[in-house]
Image (cartoon, rainbow, N blue to C red):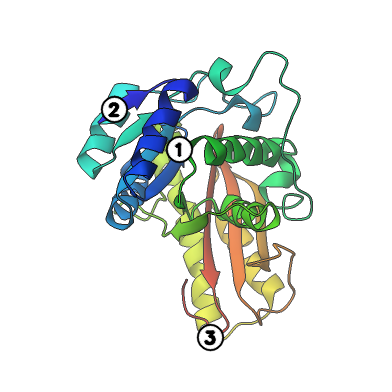
Amino acid sequence: MQIVKTIEELRPIIKGWRKEGLSVGLVPTMGYLHEGHKSLIVKAVSENDKVVVSDFVNPTQFGANEDLSSYPRDIDRDATLCEAAGASLIFHPEPEEMYAPDNCTFVDMNKLTKGLCGKTRPSHFSGVCTVVSKLFHIVTPDLAYFGEKDAQQLAVIRRMVRDMNFDIKIVGCPIVREEDGLAMSSRNTYLNQEERQAALILHKSLTLGENMIKAGERDAIKVKNAIIKNIQTEPLAQIDYVEVVDAETLEPVESIENSILVATAVYIGKTRLIDNFSKDLEGNGR
């Protein structure tokens, strides 16, 4: 498995694969990989001849007071996981490789990025759309794989691909959880022992809401309030948002009648964690 750091080095490799008639899958990541990322890579390997994993902490998706400098990084650890999962290549550029000093071009979106994480992170999705667009142009994959834990990101990327006519299929992959239910995240490493236990309130509260819907509750406000009330029982938890939205438009709903997303972002101490679940028209998990 190769680790490639420049676009100039990567492009001939991709072109060589294309000349051989090989399909290419892309798994975009910010590194410090865990079993959730591994599940994306394994799926990509099962569906493509070659798989590129991008390993890049993208500065443009971090706000002024966010954790860019402290975000965990370990390329050797990542390489071990990628090789075990069957990846063909890691693209591991420096920020200067992805953004010229006088870079002034960005990809932005309205509507889908205004609520949920976009409400308190207003520049975040411009950074996401920009770097993912660049990766799509550099790698030219047939399929690209994203986790459903970042549900708003997945919806945004799908809409961008549709609106910008990228010839790429986006594959959403299920949330991977620890045995106790905590959604896997690179930011979980920030949690001390007490905070790690407190973080379980996210999944417990979302499960409460999911069970309400399974039992027939269709009032979105009641489900939302029940989740909020349960999260508030944990002293270390501070809610950023809890929302019940249409799964496609991400607009808030009052009645659970169509496919919906129930999403939350919660600070446990100083660490911001996200989690969610989706339901379709029949009330089955998605």
**Residue carrying label 3:** 282
> Does residue 28 sit above or below 202 in this rendering?
above
User: Which residue is at the far left?
Assistant: 84
Q: What residue is rendered at 50% in x and 58% in y?
A: 169
For marks 3 and 1, give the CA distance. 33 Å
Of the image marks 3 and 2, the number of the one nearer the N terminus: 2
Of the image marks 3 and 1, the number of the one nearer the N terminus: 1
Q: x, y (%) of residue 117?
A: 67, 46
**Quadrant of res 95:** top right
**Residue carrying label 2:** 2
User: Which residue is at the far top?
Assistant: 101
Is 158 or 242 nearer to us in this picture?
158
User: Which residue is at the far front?
Assistant: 19
Is there CB contact under 8 Å for labels 3 and 1? no
Instruction: Name the quarter where the N terminus is drawn.
Output: top left
**Residue carrying label 1:** 29
Of the image marks 1 and 2, the number of the one nearer the N terminus: 2
Q: Residues within 10 Å of mark 1 (few under 14, many from 20)?
A: some
Dot 1: what SS?
strand
Is there CB contact under 8 Å for labels 3 and 2? no
For marks 3 and 2, give the CA distance. 45 Å
Q: Is residue 189 left or right of residue 214?
A: left
For marks 1 and 2, give the CA distance. 16 Å
